[in-house]
Image (cartoon, grey):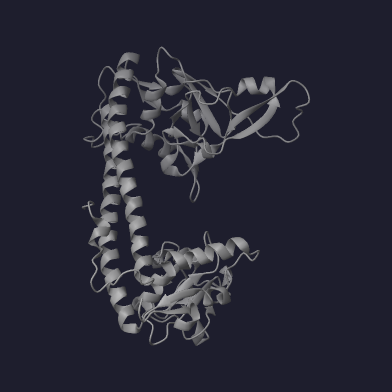
Amino acid sequence: MSGWRSLRLKDLCIDTGQYGLNVSAEAYAQSGVRLLRTTDISSGILTSDESGVFVDTVSEERFILAAGDLILSRSGTPPGQSYLVRRADAGMTFAGYLVRFRPRSNTDPRFLAYTARSDPFQETIQAESVSSTIQNFNAERYANIRCKAPDITQQRRIADFLDGETTRIDRLMDARHTQSSKLEEHDYSYVSETLVPGTLKNSGKGGMYPWLPELPTDRPLVRLGHVCQIQNGLTVDGKRDVSGDAVTRPYLRVANVQAGHVLFDSVAEITVPRAIADRSTLRPGDVLMTEGGDLDKLGRGAVWNGELPGCLHQNHIFALRPFRSDLDGEYLALMTQTLHGRCYFESTGSKTTNLASTNSSKILSFPIPLPTIEIQRDLTSQVQKRLQATTALRKLLGRQLALLTERRQALITAAVTGQFDVSTASGRNVTEGLSA
């Protein structure tokens, strides 16, 4: 730690921070000077111009960004997100919920940016945000955050070291993300081809469902409404009289129903008359489908296994109750995840800009390839075994990603706080045992 000084952020910068432009959305332009917002830097990487906003001109030089500037967010969850302005970004401007810090000539901008991402810096922001009633972390508070720094030569060595080591870790993380995505693609293809043979080779035969291949003779196409009932959920009504024979039950909302599974992290309760509860009580084997959501998730089913006895469901969730001798609930839930299921619900869904919705009529009209119940169960067992294996692999990849993220952060913190000498150290041990 010889030669390291204890400083405040402002001691490494030419000023105590510059707030960005206070400009309303009405002033945005189709082109001109890009205006950076908190949402544009939330991942630490600048979003593309296509998702950005612009203003016509910037009247004052102090609002113009230069290469090497450090931008910190005043708000967000959490505040303290940062971005180091690149040469390609020079000339852009920034919004009022961001603060710009410009390094002194004896401060390496990359070292400053790594310092802003280090644990001590971020922990200070967290601690002061929790203890303060002020929602925004202002420039003065940023300027006075304590940090440590060596001379400019050592700063550059540290920044060069971290550039190389974080790039190595980032490559590993990219590889893990790619592997996870390929596993998801494999699952999608496997489920589709197993339940609807010929799906992956189909070139489109036209007709009402052009994505469907020629089906085997043992899998006739049957309207879903012929082999199951649909149960509607209940509506929250504050005026409902619950003074008589009423019950309080767990209550599933749309957020609880995901593709292929149910989330139990936050299950609400509701008090309703017993008669109403009886009409909306879930039974083991029911297949849950949500009425609306993202288009690519519309119509995906999750099987209810009776985890919460007497559980009710919201009116925006449909409960499909298969006729047990004709349709297996797990088979139906998997069928909604096939290419056939996706094409049907995406083509029949009512679409808005970002969301889509379906209804009971469209759900009951879903044409499902229907072999015998024995074949359905055999196919379901086969698919579930494969999915269990790929799920285990994805969990392993997830653990590796978490470990790489943790080690990346630890390496940055150790380097910018002088815990080791980067001129003699190698960060390869950070990724030991994890190859691309």
Tell me the quarter of the picture where residue 209 sits: top left
In the rendered view, does 405 fall on the left or right side of 101? left
Horizontal and vertical percent position of residue 188:
30, 37
Residue 407 visible in this rendered orientation of the protein: yes
Give residue 17's position: percent from left, percent from top.
Answer: 52, 80
Query: Residue 384 or 297: which is nearer the viewer?
Result: 384
Query: Relative to 94, does residue 171 appear above or below in the rendering?
Result: above
Q: Is residue 48 above or below residue 154?
A: above
Residue drawn at x 47%, y 29% as measured from the top left = 363
Taking the spot 31% from the left edge, 37% from the top edge, the residue there is 392
Image quadrant where residue 383 sits: top left
Could you say where residue 300 lies in the image, as x and y percent from the top left? 43, 34
Whether residue 36 is visible, yes or no, is no
Question: Position of 86 compared to 244: left or right?
Answer: left
Residue 65, x across and y down, in percent:
44, 80
Position of the N terminus by quadrant: bottom left
Q: Nearer the viewer, residue 282 or 226?
A: 282
Residue 84: quarter of image:
bottom left
Residue at (29, 70) in percent of width and height:
163
